Image (tube, grey):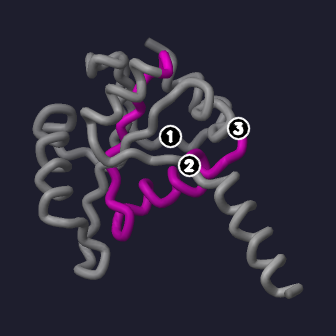
Amino acid sequence: MKTFFQLLLLLITLSINAQDWQLNLDESKELAQNENKQILLVFSGSDWCAPCIKLEKKIWKSQDFQDYAKDNLVLLRADFPRLKKNQPSKEQQEHNNTLAENYNPNGYFPFVVLMDAKGAVLNQLGYKNIDPESYIKAINDY
């Protein structure tokens, strides 16, 4: 019984700290409109792009960013992993390719796009070796 409660506590802790990354632009737009938020679209190569991995660890997983995002952003990820075991479904890959054609035609990784709820681009940036608070300011510097 003790193990059950430890597992339950672990799952609750993980769910509190987990971010709700969306994978679909249309759903993200709907959420952003309903919640009066902006959309942060992140292009990443989660299993090969060193700056993408650093951005994930240093910024996206930081408590400062999570607190900010919870109140202000709908998070949308377009991941382009290289390892076969990490490949998204064919449908998701096609969706990510469309996002890249429309919002990241130069193929930069990582590439971060701030949009309004209708999908209009407000700001674009990449990896910056700065603290989470400064990165949040950079996102909103438009």
Specify whether residue 52 is painted magenta.
yes
Q: Which residue is mark 3?
A: 64
Residue lying furthest front: 1
Q: Nearer the viewer, mark 1 or mark 3?
A: 3
Count residues near mark 1 (Cα–Cα under 10 Å), then give few for <14, some for 14-19, many for 20+.
some
Amino acid type of the residue tagged 1 in the rendering: Lys
Disc with the residue nearer the chain's start (1 vs 3): 3
Q: Quadrant of the C terminus?
A: top left
* Secondary structure beneath label 1: loop
Specify whether residue 133 is painted magenta.
no
Note whether 61 is above or below 122 in the view shown.
below
Q: Which residue is mark 1?
A: 128
* Secondary structure beneath label 2: loop
Q: CA distance from mark 2 to mark 3?
A: 12 Å
**Residue 136 position in % (x across, y down):** 58, 28
Note whether 65 is above or below 23 in the view shown.
above
Q: Which residue is mark 2?
A: 19
Q: Is residue 72 left or right of residue 12?
A: left
Note whether 14 is above or below 68 in the view shown.
below
Q: Quadrant of the N terminus?
A: bottom right
In percent of the image, x 13 and y 64: which residue is there?
90
Q: Nearer the viewer, mark 2 or mark 1?
A: 2
Amino acid type of the residue tagged 3 in the rendering: Asp
- As rendered, which of 112 and 36 lies closer to the eye? 36
**Residue 134 position in % (x across, y down):** 63, 29
Q: Quadrant of residue 65?
A: top right
Amino acid type of the residue tagged 2 in the rendering: Gln
In percent of the image, x 18 and y 40: which residue is there?
99
Q: Is residue 109 left or right of residue 137?
A: left
